[in-house]
Amino acid sequence: MKIACPVCYCDAGEYNINIDEFSIYKCINCGLEHTYPIPTDKELIDFYSRYEDIRADSAIVKLNVQNNLEKLLKYGLNKNSLIFDFGCGKGEFVDIAGKNCYGVEHSNSVGDRIFNNLDNLEIKEFEYITLWGALEYLNDIKQIMKKLSNILKKDGYIIITTVDAEGKIPYYYKPPEHLTYWTKKSLHLLAEYIECDILEISQYNMKQFSHIYLDRLLSRTPKEHAVVIKDSINKLPEIIEIPTNELFTVFKKR
Ligand SMILES: [Zn+2]
């Protein structure tokens, strides 16, 4: 049986890594790492009904929403901009971005300006569409991205942060939660498919408590050494900006 890349449809190649009942293949053309079999909508709904999200501290979540909004200022974001946040989770971004921001979250009950289905959106043309760590969750990438492109104004922007399969920071395969792991080439092919140009692909940085970051960095260090190392660098500010294993990408519609 031939297993094809969900972005460029190229042969997945022979080699794969098995995780539980899934396999991760790497596309020999665009480098996308993708999960096989791709779970159906029903399987994902079942999975998320049993799923407990590990939430970051809410102060950090809010700081990162602010940080994300600031990243969009150089692309012309202002307080009147119409924004749509796809995969908006608990809706922190929608809340903080303000009354011109709407969101969709399939596994969420509806709230203020938040819907559980793309088809229920009343507004059909946005200036900014954001997917903060949502692309890797999609089981039908091209169809969903096409739908999103259809509700994006000409010259509008799609902002995506997603797992960087070419970066220096390790990431874990976690199907069926994360289904794809992206390369620059696969993002360019996706942009082409939805008639967008890519204006930026850069390392995504986030804000984090320095003590949490240090714990993570030192997680493989024996405790007695970790204590000494922490003591010697405890002059870090409480909150620092750290690199992540995600890419920050900006698509602009032609
Ligand atoms: Zn591919």
Image (cartoon, rainbow, N blue to C red):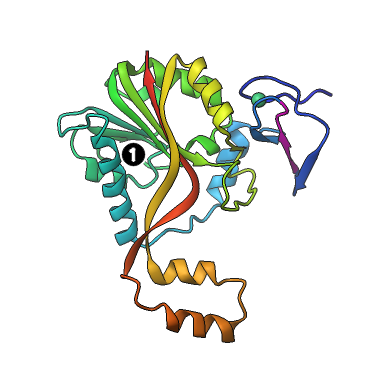
Residue 18 drawn above or below residue 223:
above
- Which secondary structure, mark 1? loop
Q: Quadrant of the N terminus?
A: top right
Residue 56 drawn above or below residue 29:
below
Q: Which residues are magenta?
A: 22-28
Q: Position of residue 36 (x, y in %)?
A: 72, 34
Q: Main secondary structure of the magenta part?
A: strand
Q: How many marks?
A: 1
Asked whether 26 falls inside the magenta stretch, the response is yes
Extreme residue in the left direction:
80
Q: Residue at x 24, y 44 (%)?
A: 95
Residue 163 visible to an observer of this rendering: yes
Q: Position of residue 43 (x, y in %)?
A: 63, 38
Q: Which residue is mark 1?
A: 110
Q: Residue at x 83, y 32 (%)?
A: 14
Q: Position of residue 206 (x, y in %)?
A: 38, 52
Q: Residue at x 61, y 76 (%)?
A: 221
Between 177 and 135, the one lying in front of the other is 135
The residue type indicated by label 1 comes to: Val
Is 225 on the left-hand or right-hand side of 103?
right
Q: Quadrant of residue 235?
A: bottom left
Q: Quadrant of residue 68?
A: top left
Q: Quadrant of ligand 1?
A: top right
Extreme residue in the front direction:
232
Q: Quadrant of residue 180?
A: top right
Asked whether 100 falls inside the magenta stretch, the response is no
Is 1 on the left-hand or right-hand side of 4?
right
Residue 39 visible to an observer of this rendering: no
